[in-house]
Amino acid sequence: MRARDAEGRRLAIGNAAMMQEEGIELADHDLDHWQAQARTLVYLSLDGVLAAGFAIEDPLREDSRDAVARLQADGLKVVMLTGDNAATARAIGDEVGIDEVHAELSPEDKHAEIERLQAEGEVVGMVGDGINDAPALARADVGFAIGQGTDVAIESAGVTLMRSSLHGVAAAIEISQATLANIRQNLWGALGYNALCIPIAAGLLYPLTGTLLSPMIAGAAMSASSITVVANANRLRLKRLRPQNVQASRPSSAPAQEVRS
């Protein structure tokens, strides 16, 4: 951000890239150690001279590392896409267990990274909560917006998480996978059941035994088929998809992340 104060002096506040645009050399200022501690540096210049530096820390949620590990255990590759500087992003990635980190990305860069992964045949899910994440959320195969994020992010995403925990992403994926598996079971079960029962109802046994299937028995058999399908679907209610240690909603502090299978 650039502005002028009441005395007409030129003020600029922003990251290292903005200071470079102002022609300010930062190499002489020992602030890089803050980046190694997962802090973001913001600089303030006055008439082209560095006046102050700020180290901003946004602490991670306590369950972020467990959530990332849960996604990885589900067979997903977790990648961080963030606008933070590389040192800060790498420190956060190490803290939560993310190996692949892409830092200093603009909204357009995040969108392009999603497109690149899709061009390689990947199915991409994007998790974000800010305006800068909106293009990538809209481009991803599935966009997950944090419920406490910006309205633009929520409108751009296909799924909105009611809690700030990344465990919600894992739970949503696990529920989807379990639902699809249940649907396949019901389809194959119904197909096999009907393939066996319809010929019998049509009189397949009559040439062999001289008996025909009673309409009452046929009706009961069809009811049993429906009951079997409903009972199998209700097994999803017994599946534990949310660990007990997931805490109540708190403001999310983790940078936007991308999940791909």
Image (cartoon, rainbow, N blue to C red):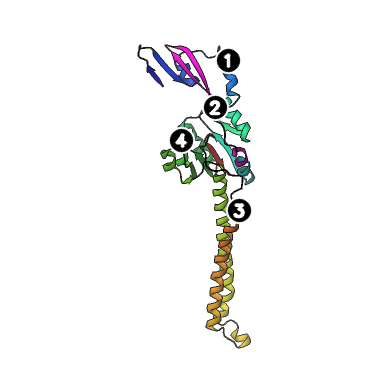
Q: Which residues are magenta?
A: 38-67
Q: Amino acid at mark 3?
A: Arg
Pick whichever of labels 2 and 3 is earlier in the sequence.
2
Numbered disc in front, either 1 or 3: 3
Eyeballing the image, is 83 above or below 237? above
Q: Position of residue 222 (x, y in %)?
A: 54, 74
Q: Position of residue 101 (x, y in %)?
A: 58, 32
Pick whichever of labels 3 and 4 is earlier in the sequence.
4
- Dot 1, crowdedness within 10 Å: few (<14), some or many (≥20)? few
In the image, 7 versus 88, the foreground residue is: 7
Residue 45 within the segment the image draws in magenta: yes
Pick whichever of labels 2 and 4 is earlier in the sequence.
2
Pick whichever of labels 1 and 2 is earlier in the sequence.
1
**Residue under label 4:** 130
Pick whichever of labels 4 and 1 is earlier in the sequence.
1
Q: Amino acid at mark 1?
A: Asp
Q: Amino acid at mark 2?
A: Glu
Quadrant of the rendered structure where residue 35 is?
top right
**Residue under label 3:** 240
**Residue under label 2:** 57
Give residue 99's mark: none
Question: How far apart in space, not on screen, are marks 2 and 4 (Cα)?
Answer: 17 Å
Q: Quadrant of the N terminus?
A: top left
Asked whether the viewer can see residue 99, the reply is no
Q: Quadrant of the C terminus?
A: top right
Q: Amino acid at mark 4?
A: Gly
Question: How far apart in space, not on screen, are marks 1 and 2 (Cα)?
Answer: 17 Å
**Residue under label 1:** 30
In the image, 21 versus 178, the foreground residue is: 178
Question: How far apart in space, not on screen, are marks 2 and 3 (Cα)?
Answer: 34 Å
Q: Residue at x 60, y 56 (%)?
A: 239
